[in-house]
Amino acid sequence: MSDEAYTNDFDDVSDPNPQGDTELAIEGALRPQSLSEFVGQRKVRGQLQLLLDAAHMQGRAPDHILLSGPPGLGKTTLAMIVAHESGRALRLSSGPAIQHAGDLAALLSSLTPGEVLFIDEVHRMARSAEEMLYLAMEDFRIDIMVGKGAGATSVALELSPFTLVGATTRSGLLPNPLRDRFGFTAHLEFYDPSELERVVERSASMLGIEIPGEGRAEIARRSRGTPRIANRLLRRVRDYMLVHDTGGTPEAVHAALELYDVDAIGLDRLDRAVLDALIHRFRGGPVGLNTLAVTVGEEPETIESVVEPYLVRIGFMGRTPRGRIATALAYDHLGVVSPDHAAKLHDL
């Protein structure tokens, strides 16, 4: 994946068939440009504002920043805002794209003074690149080996001062030496429905559509606490309104989301397939991750990183040493009598 191909973490707002430059400009406007426009994450916004203001008053680049949290909460957008409010250029890359120390050396040596370097999924960098990054973050230099064998020598290459903004969905995989070199670490939390309503309201205004309060609340309830999902569902509602020539009524919002298999609490087809397999194929579990993934026809990583976090968070799935289990709440949501409840009825 090239640096240029890496996109905004807050929301990929481009459509596959944009209708001219005006449409692209409107879609791009969904991305907040400043901390004052950024909805939610109040504590993190306050901390970042203080960090940026202090750096500006001292005429220096902001400290290195580590942003952690689930996908879709705004890590890339915050990196863009850091660059914008600092008046600095921004370079975007990703951990999987940096598989050798040479990749990182080429990237760092091309940075201009004060530039903001954003590395998404920073925990997925190659180990050799991580070790090179330690010195770069601390002393703004890297050591490059020239030659091979006994005649090899180390040459120090001075770097322009820069600010690294790292993003990770799995902060526990970051080695301590790398984590300790970030001057500021923030964890992004899932959004409240009221915050997501504000996200939907702002995005709807930018898209030129009107969604009444009840419709915005319906989208927010089904967005799993994630702005990226809220914007994606809003675009599908917009498409439904356009094709069926309806307003943004609660009925239209409901019909659009039902069409795309998003239920009242945000479960989609894959979520329900996992729960259905747990309950009907494995009698509520426990069942191993790989077995569950094969049953629903998905990769184990997809189940673990996309489906499982939300189901665990809302109390529909449990993780045990023996495997995944379905909870009583999952049975209730699918309208199935749980084994415990059935046993009690049998005893009566």
Image: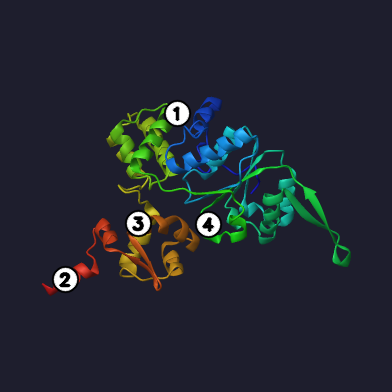
Q: CA distance from mark 3 to mark 2?
A: 26 Å
Residue furthest to the left:
348
In depth, the one of 325 and 102 nearer the eye is 102
The residue beneath circle 3 is 272
Residue 115 place in picture, x, y as percent = 67, 39
The residue beneath circle 2 is 344
Density class for disc 4 (Cα within 10 Å; few <14, some 14-19, many ≥20) is some
Badge 1 or badge 2: first in the primary sequence: 1
* Tag of residue 206: 1
In depth, the one of 85 and 300 nearer the eye is 85
Density class for disc 2 (Cα within 10 Å; few <14, some 14-19, many ≥20) is few
**Residue at point 19% right, 67% down?**
341
Q: CA distance from mark 4 to mark 3?
A: 28 Å
The residue beneath circle 4 is 171
**Residue at point 54% right, 43% down?**
76
Badge 4 or badge 1: first in the primary sequence: 4
In this rendering, would 213 be left or right of 44? left
